[in-house]
Amino acid sequence: MTNSIPEIENNDVLFVIGSNTTETHPIIGLRMKQAVRKGGKIIVADPRKIDLVRFSTLWLQHKAGTDVALLNGIMHVLLKEHLIDKDFIAGWTEGFDTFRESLSEYSPERAEKITGVPRKDIVKAALMYGKAERPAIYYTMGITQHSHGTQNVFAIANLALMTGNLGKESTGVNPLRGQNNVQGATDMGCVPNQYPGYQRVDLPSIKSKFEAAWDAKLSDRPGITATEMTDAAIDGKLKALYIMGENPLISDPDSHHTEKALKSLDFLVVQDIFMTETAELADVVLPAACFAEKDGTFTNTERRVQRVRKALNPPGQAREDSSIIMELSGRMGYAMNYNLVEEMMREIGGLWPAVAGITYGRIEKGGLQWPCPTLDHPGTPYLFKGGFPRGKASFTVVGYEPSKELPDKDYPFVLTTGRQLFQYHTGSMTRKVKELNAVAPEAYVEINPADADSMKIEDGDVVSVSSRRGSVSIKARVSERPPRGMVFIPFHYKEAAANVLTNPQLDPVCKIPELKVCAVRIEPASARP
Amino acid sequence: MGTGGIAAGGADVMDVFKKRLKEKGIQSEVKKHCSMHKVGCRGLCARDVLVDVIRYDVKTTYQFIKSDMVERIVEEHIVRGTPVAEWLVPEDYHHFHDKQVKVVLADCGMVDPEDIESYFGAGGYEALRKVLSGLTPEETIDVIKRSGLRGRGGAGFPTGLKWELTRKAAGNPKYVICNADEGDPGAFMDRSVIEGNPHAVIEGMIIAAHAIGSDHGYVYIRAEYPLAVERLRKALQQARHHNLLGENIIGTAMDFDIKVKLGAGAFVCGESTALMYSIEGKRGMPRVTPPRSTEAGLWKLPTCLNNVETLANVPSIIRNGAEWYASFGTEKSKGTKVFALTGKIKNSGLIEVPMGIPLRQIVYDIGGGIENDKAFKAVQMGGPSGGCIPVEHLDVPVDFESLTALGAMVGSGGLVVMDEDSCMVDVAKYFLHFTQSESCGKCTPCRIGTKRLLEILERITAGDGREGDIDLLLDLSADIKVSSLCGLGQSAPNPIITTIRYFREEFEAHVTGKKCPAKVCRKLLAYSIYEERCKGCGACVRVCPAGAITGEKKKPHVINPEICIKCGSCVEACKFKAIGRE
Amino acid sequence: MIKVIIDGKETRVPKGTTILEAARALHIPIPTLCNHPKLSPYGGCRLCLVEVKGNRHPVTSCSVPASDGMEVVTSTPLLERIRKTNIELLLSDHPNDCMVCEKAGDCTLQELAYFYGIRENRFAGERRIYEKKDANPFIERDMEKCILCGLCVRVCEEVEGVSAIDFAYRGFNAKIVPSFEKALDCEFCGQCVAVCPTGALTGKMWSYKGRQKDVRDVDTVCSYCGCGCNLTLHIRRNEVVRVSSRDDTINEGWLCAKGRFGYSFVNSPERLKTPLIKEKGTFREASWDEALDLVANKLKKIRAKHGADAIAGLSSARCTNEENYLFQKFMRAAVGTNNIDHCARL
Ligand SMILES: Cc1cc2nc3c(=O)[nH]c(=O)nc-3n(C[C@H](O)[C@H](O)[C@H](O)COP(=O)(O)O)c2cc1C
Ligand code: SF4
Ligand code: SF4
Ligand code: SF4
Ligand code: FES
């Protein structure tokens, strides 16, 4: 997020696109509701009638996967209505002229044709966002989990840049990170091409800095991403995989494919707190401590580093992940010795200046938002105040491309997947909580009443949902939430795993799979062969 | 003819008149002199149905008319010109009217409430025309201020000031609301005004709207008043038809229209903030102030809430001038007030008197004294929020300040007369029963406190009163009064406080002597059979549900006090008045 | 800024500050039961009444804004008498079963009863009796203990935006009910539980696991979504028995159903407790030494044969920063590959 959570309340316009915020980020959802109480207005762009629509002034029900067309249509109107920030564009950005040209094709009329959103609503959204004083954009996986997810993100950036809606309090672009420490995992360099602090592995000066600090020889070849690891395993290029606290069998697209990949490995180590579906396939399973059993820090979606504290001893012989890694590292011939978890934090601060000012002492109460370079720095609630770190920001020309797999005669429905309030991710934690299971016991597929009617499906019927990759049988939940022609399945349930159906088609740049759009067919379960 | 008149058979009487007159062909024959209207209520409910016959400009009034009496009136009076003497109203009918001053009720009973033309005929909407053509909002407010008009809904807040505060408050749009909830048991002034002359209220609202700068109005009226609602709706329709409501009212730049909202029949919904929540579709529960409704009322926008009677006064004030209105009443309480006079009184009904009139005149001159000429005991003024006034204060001037000083209040205008047969503990219990079940439940003292007051009164009247109960009642009452959130709780203890203040010995008789001097509290009575009167018929034995009465046939019976549950059934069953209660 | 004098102490506060807030800033205690700093003022409990110079009647300090030059007295014989009466009234309609109440020790009503020394009750009388029957899995709703402060109704509407509960009935019988008096069916965020000053709303899974004084509190951060809500884990005998949240953090004390009620996985019997090694398709328990040696040897062998890039690591968005740091350091420095990723993309 470029802004921080408390700033949300003071937005005068909140443009929420591809984020079912109240269910996936409930507490951020609360702040959005506060913003409404304080007079702010919400524009929701989502194919489904998500709960936030109740609080919105305007709901743009665009077809799944048409975000770029919608955003470009909005920007077309902003341009026409002169609702752009010329000073900001001149001072802070580059590439505006070519970009401006590219918008000419996206008249609201054309955008309406592609997205299904009435042109008057596109105009209204543009005027609301364009005239607002403190508008912010919020998005989640509904934007990124597409084969053209990067394009979607660029389109959003263009929108903020052309209106100068960045670098100010309560004004900015806010991707909401899905899991408690995704931000931290990325910050800490658990990505194939970057060391901690977004420092590139292929830059010699950086590599030598880390080699010196770690006293080790390092590779300058960027590694492969999680989704690429699957293919590499099947191709035989990847032999061993060490998984710490993840369950890709359920969370990754096309589960059959993932299973095949994991089984192709010579050696699989899984370190987890439960015997997950993925752990079942492992050669060695290492029992780890959960969040309540260890010290450390988490970094939330607004870059706030906060203290995690040990409250319990892990069960049996289970151990903290850090102690397991240290042990293992020693046995691999590379000794790591830290007496206190805090020593690691200090080491990180030495390598990544943006967190140099964060110590356990300072975050005893409340946490600090990076960048926080010095011990007396108060942290940074919002980014880009007074400029971008790397000079000027560029506009990117983004054209609308349809999703890779669109409905057709054989697979007439669009399937989209996501979360629901009472379960979390692959369910490895929440499904062990009996109270949560009592209110959200089983998987379901949301189907629009009109579609259900035409297929003679009633609420609660078991149906089979199939894609080109697999099929699940699942209860139908007839609901006004999805539009006609679209169905939704939460992905938390292994017994009806949505990701058996989804398309592993990756975004070419950031390698995120297209989990939000694929084509499926629905049949009453009894009609199955 | 209002709800009361119709219940007494007014509609039937009128139908028969119509039929008979038609049969006689009188409608066409004496058209010039005889026309027939239905008019609104004229106050003297105890004598319904009242009929005026105006023959060659001479008005004669009949009382207690039933449909089967119509034929004779038509035959003897209308056709032959000799009034039916025995059915005429007696002299005191005129007393009933003599001491009254009618401003609000002036046209009630004179104009046809369902016909706007009839209201026009009585000078209706002239005040509005005067205001819209010649008075700025500020000038209008000034007239109302100078008239000294104070709210008739109970609190007596200066109306002109309320209008001014709303006018000056920031926010748009602004609202005018007419409070016609009238949840006070025994009150029917507002109903009668709307049934009798709805256009006066509407005209008052439009003038208020002009004064505060509002284009939306509401009448919040209880759903239990179907006739009033119907007449109000009809009147609004007619007013719209004549462009007295809607856009560009009578050719001016003013827009204003009125919606009718039906109340759900909760007493507390008459409280201003609760009423506004109720209009918003929320639970009718009072809220803390500030902010006042004049700043943040309906939908948190500036709102002027006035009572029906308050608004109905407005057209007359504008027409006749502030000074005219201020000439009635006292220094601080100007004008007139409508009361619903009920209880043990000869002439019960709706009256309008100048403020400051001695209570005695209301009871004896207008009311004609106590029914069956029993002794006067007290008057309960202001309904469940008010207090009682005993005989020693019968000369109190009826105005806001004097009544409040006695612990009673003008309130909404209920005036219940009690005679020697009323038990004051029972009276207090009756009102507490009402307030505690009508409490909205929001604040502690009212929700639980009034319940505890009622419980204590219940045990006192059941003979289980404890030493110290009277002081406990007073202590708790005082705490509820200061600490309740809204007027309901703040005034709920008033009936207890005043009855104890003026009739403490009656409470003590209940608590210590376990006796009810007025012989009302059943559980405190001992039932016994007068040997000398008892014929031994056994009627009492048959009705006694407890089997407490025994005796041989034709010999005096006896009641066993151990078994008697004090239901009183035997007293009613005995034809020989042989059973007594002490 | 305006000047107010409370109990003789002068202070300056911004316009719009309530008398209660100003008094709290001066550390002057005023008892309250229906006030919450994040919710709209209500004025139902009547405990916060104070006297303001020039006002005939006491006013509720929770709702009345301070005005310039206002002089306030927070404690007088009259005020204390009213407070005592109202607390006594509340207790006269309360089960008074503190000895078995989940909330004892953490209950505002109990606190006030103690402070005002209420033992005998002048107003003993009828008590509301309700069957306990709310079937939802999370929230125990014992409406006999409810003092109708309305905090739950307000938090549900004003913070959660759900309005799952509201007042019903009048007077003494007023009651907080879910719509149509059915079992609660809502987002189960437990905001209502968090604000309830009495034992009327508690967590069903808390019951008889230990009261406030028995537990140790540990502040930490939620392990579910990316909001980063602060949690306080209440620990008794190596078990999480309850979760709450302080209101001075980023999430202001609000949580969602998962954060507040979804903690029992921590003490689940299904937790992995020993290292496991798979042999002929089935797992067997192993010692740490055995398991770690096996992993190290296997990885070394594969690295020797196929190069370091034949090994990859997948780390977790649910592990701490420090663990993620160590994990990538391990992959890069100990194994020698950049094949490291996590599930940010999912
Ligand atoms: C419990 C309660 C019930 C009330 N009921 C009524 C009512 O039925 N009609 C009414 O006009 N005022 C009623 N009031 C008074 C109103 O709150 C308000 O003061 C009045 O409508 C204002 O109009 P006025 O200034 O013209 O009197 C009630 C007040 C309370 C506290
Ligand atoms: S005084 Fe009674 S009616 Fe008024 S708010 Fe309190 S509980 Fe409700
Ligand atoms: S749990 Fe949350 S949603 Fe449910 S009633 Fe309580 S506050 Fe409302
Ligand atoms: S349940 Fe608790 S929070 Fe809700 S009104 Fe009752 S006492 Fe207050
Ligand atoms: S805290 Fe002010 S009335 Fe309850």
Image (cartoon, coloured by chain):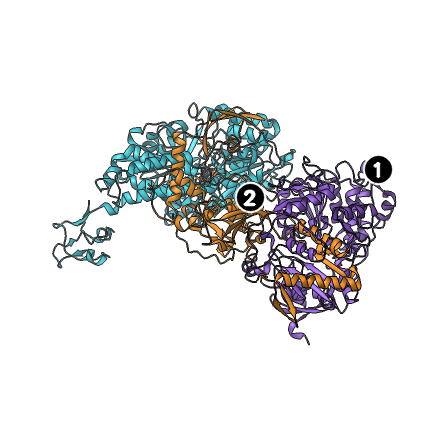
Chain colours: A purple, B cyan, C orange
Q: Position of residue A279 (x, y in %)?
A: 65, 64
Q: In this figure, which residue is indicated by the disc labeled 1?
A: A90
**Marks 1/2: CA distance?**
46 Å
The percent position of residue A482, horizontal first and vertical second, equals: 68, 59
Give the quadrant of the N terminus of chain B: top left
Q: Residue A65 sits in which quadrant?
A: bottom right
Q: Confirm whether circles 1 and 2 share one chain.
A: no
At x 69%, y 51%, the residue is: A336
Label 1 packing within 10 angstroms: few (<14), some (14-19), many (20+): few
Q: Residue C246 bears which disc, if any?
A: 2
Vertical arrangement, residue A414 with respect to residue A80, above or below:
below
Location of residue B165 (image quadrant)? top right
Foreground pick, B320 / B521: B521
Which amino acid type is marked by label 1?
Ala
What residue occupies the far bottom of the structure in this picture?
A: A529
Say what secondary structure mark 2 lies in.
loop
Residue B47 can be seen in this image = no
Q: Chain of mark 2?
A: C
Name the chain under label 1.
Answer: A
Q: Which quadrant of the figure shows ligand 2?
A: top left
Secondary element at tag 1: helix
Quarter the C terminus of chain B occupies: top left
Q: Quadrant of residue B502?
A: top left
Question: Three-letter amino acid code at disc 2?
Answer: Arg
